[in-house]
Amino acid sequence: MFNRRITAGLMSGVVAVGLVLSGQAVAAFTAQEAAKLDAEAQATLAKFQADTKGSAEVFANAKGVLVCPKITKGGLIIGVESGDCVLTSGAPKPIYYGTSALKGGLLVGISWYSMILVLNTDDAVAKFTKGEREWEMGVDASVAVAKVGAGGALDTTNLKKDIVSFIFGDKGLMGDVSFSGSRFKKLDVE
């Protein structure tokens, strides 16, 4: 009896976190939210460039840059993550996306991080922006994870791949965040 209550409580918690994090996918994306996301994306880019040696060169050569200022991840055993992103370069005007993923494993709690995807080729930009369907990491394209090398500078090993991700939090670049299976869906601004 006690185990059933614990199991029911855990499942209720997972469902509640999922509903909270996925609520943005159902709600309309307004022009005010787009303007706020643009400002947050610019601040995220500025902080990343100030904190990461060699990042200016990466962005100078990029064909497109997608910025996700705040991705929220939470759960208990089964987790969900979601956030809003904007393609700040690579298209004539900004394109807005919602990102989401369902994760499994040893997950407990809630956390936040930022992500920047650098699209290094015209083909990568075209594949990411085409159509109205969702784009999924690991299915539609493979993504290299950037790492910081000795002295705090970027490790240039993966920086020439078609798509490179920079995942970071308050303490700089993070290499242990799994983004495989993350989906990006275009948001219509109303």
Image (cartoon, rainbow, N blue to C red):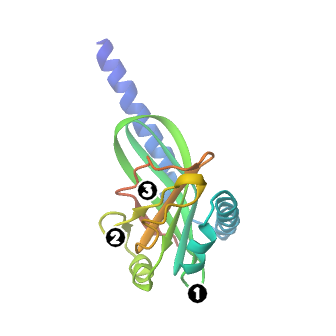
Question: Do tag 1 and tag 3 residues touch (Cβ < 8 Å)?
Answer: no
Label 1 CA crowd tier, 10 Å (few <14, some 14–19, many 20+): few
The quadrant holding residue 34 is bottom right
Is disc 3 placed on a helix, strand or loop?
strand
Q: Which residue is mark 2?
A: 141
Label 3 CA crowd tier, 10 Å (few <14, some 14–19, many 20+): many
The residue at the point 37 percent across, 73 percent down is 133
* Residue 47 percent coordinates (x, y): 69, 59
Is disc 2 placed on a helix, strand or loop?
loop
Q: CA distance from mark 2 to mark 3?
A: 16 Å
Amino acid carrying label 3: it is: Ser
Query: From the image, which quarter does the C terminus lie in?
Result: bottom right
Count of number-bearing discs: 3
Q: Nearer the viewer, residue 155 or 49?
A: 155
Q: Residue 54, can we see it?
A: yes
* Residue 124 percent coordinates (x, y): 41, 79
Mark 2 and mark 3 lie on one chain; the one further toward the N terminus is 3
Q: CA distance from mark 2 to mark 1?
A: 22 Å
Question: Do tag 2 and tag 3 residues touch (Cβ < 8 Å)?
Answer: no
Is disc 1 placed on a helix, strand or loop?
loop
The residue at the point 42 percent across, 66 percent down is 158
The residue at the point 40 percent across, 64 percent down is 144
Q: Which residue is mark 3?
A: 100
Q: Which residue is mark 1?
A: 92
Q: Nearer the viewer, residue 80 or 119?
A: 119
Mark 1 and mark 3 lie on one chain; the one further toward the N terminus is 1
* Residue 31 percent coordinates (x, y): 66, 71
The residue at the point 37 percent across, 49 percent down is 102
